[in-house]
Image (cartoon, helix red, strand yellow):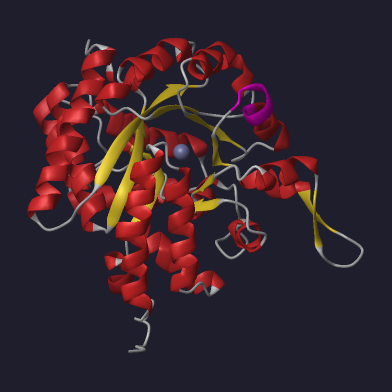
Amino acid sequence: MVGVPAPLAEENIRTAPKVLLHDHLDGGLRPATVIELAQATGYDKLPTMDPAELGKWFNEAAYSGSLERYLETFGHTVGVMQTADAVVRVAAECAEDLALDGVVYAEVRFAPELHTEQGLPLEEVVEAVLEGFRVGTELAAAQGHEIKICPLLTAMRHAARSLEIAELAVRYRDQGVLGFDIAGAEAGFPPTRHLDAFEYLRQQNAHFTIHAGEAFGLPSIWEALQWCGADRLGHGVRIVDDVSVGNDGEPKLGRLAAYVRDKRIPLEMCPTSNVHTGAADSLAEHPIGLLAKLRFRVTVNTDNRLMSGVSMTSEMAALASTFGYDWADLQWFTVNAMKSAFLGFDERLELINDVIKPGYAALMA
Ligand SMILES: [Zn+2]
């Protein structure tokens, strides 16, 4: 029987299986939780104690175009995540929120070194996140939503603890930590500052992604791939600078862009977040449109759900209405992400064949 595809409305996109590879734990708290944790832990620096106003304040700071204001938001979320209990709660709610949004597989990253202000050891930060993900997965399953969620450990690129964090990631891989990342301001802090961490990870057969080519240009992407050996690029938006228009009016790839496309290097794109940080002027002008058309290995991600006021559903819906994507396109982004996950091959295949493809097939017919 041939049916009619479901309309591309948010409530239908929410039921579609989605895969998320780039999401920051300290960027996805519920506003009410920020307030309750502030009260519980004696944190007194929040701009307001009203959940609705606080949510709005985070959005406005993200939209303000001021990096200082944007970074201030993380001061608050990280500020209330300094105890094991607080970290467990935030991680549990993250798993639950993503599952209820229809995310079936997620890799969520956090920087253990940012949660040690009150003496919490790095190991306990990692264990609290793992415990929270376990609790949240169970809470979601009880509501009929299956999710597999795994942490990535982030090191801050301006700091000097990347080797220590890389070793921590490897030590916890049998407990479910799937990989490593470096994040923070790109300009002035090239990824090659952390070569010892990346060399160690490669020798340990471990996976890593690097925030590169967000605000900063092609050299950052080139270093991340050819010096550091990154498996994926966090954002990678500026790879579009290596795509020009030839005399025949057709797009022409430079050597680095061709390498990225030929090698199927996954781009963890976060369109709305890029508009907020100024890496793109608008969604319509975001390079994801061209890069997807040229069949780069493009994936769609949220980055910071609280600050940007987004979910995987809202991001997919915004892209569909901006670029005219249909269910087949949304499935393509999702399969791209699942293929690019740091999860083992057999588990990736199982999710693609048993969850993602049947889910989209039901929506398309
Ligand atoms: Zn990010």
Residue at the (70%, 32%) spot, across then down: 222
Q: Where on the picture, by quarter, is residue 17?
A: bottom left
Horizontal arrangement in the rendering, residue 164 relative to residue 41 (left or right)? right
Residue 221 seen by the camera: yes
Of residues 244 and 188, the one drawn nearer to the viewer in this rendering: 244
Residue 68's spot in the image, x, y percent? 48, 34
What main secondary structure does the magenta stretch of the protein show?
helix
Q: Which residue lies furthest to the right in this view?
A: 247
Total marks shown come to 0
Residue at the (39%, 76%) spot, across then down: 8
**Magenta stretch holds residue 99:** no
Residue 286's spot in the image, x, y percent? 60, 58
Horizontal arrangement in the rendering, residue 11 relative to residue 7 (left or right)? left
Horizontal arrangement in the rendering, residue 155 relative to residue 56 (left or right)? right
What is the span of residues highlighted in magenta in the rendered image?
224-229
Residue 189 seen by the camera: no
Of residues 182 and 77, the one drawn nearer to the viewer in this rendering: 182
The answer to whether 62 is drawn above or below residue 206 in the figure is below
Q: If the image is split into quadrants, where does the C terminus sit?
A: bottom left
Residue at the (14%, 50%) spot, across then down: 140
Of residues 253 and 310, the one drawn nearer to the viewer in this rendering: 253
Residue 24's spot in the image, x, y percent? 36, 38
Residue 135's spot in the image, x, y percent? 12, 38
Residue at the (31%, 74%) spot, across then down: 362
Q: If the image is split into quadrants, where does the N terminus sit?
A: bottom left
Q: Where on the picture, by quarter, is residue 287?
A: bottom right
Q: Where on the picture, by quarter, is residue 312?
A: bottom left
Horizontal arrangement in the rendering, residue 69 relative to residue 323 (left or right)? left
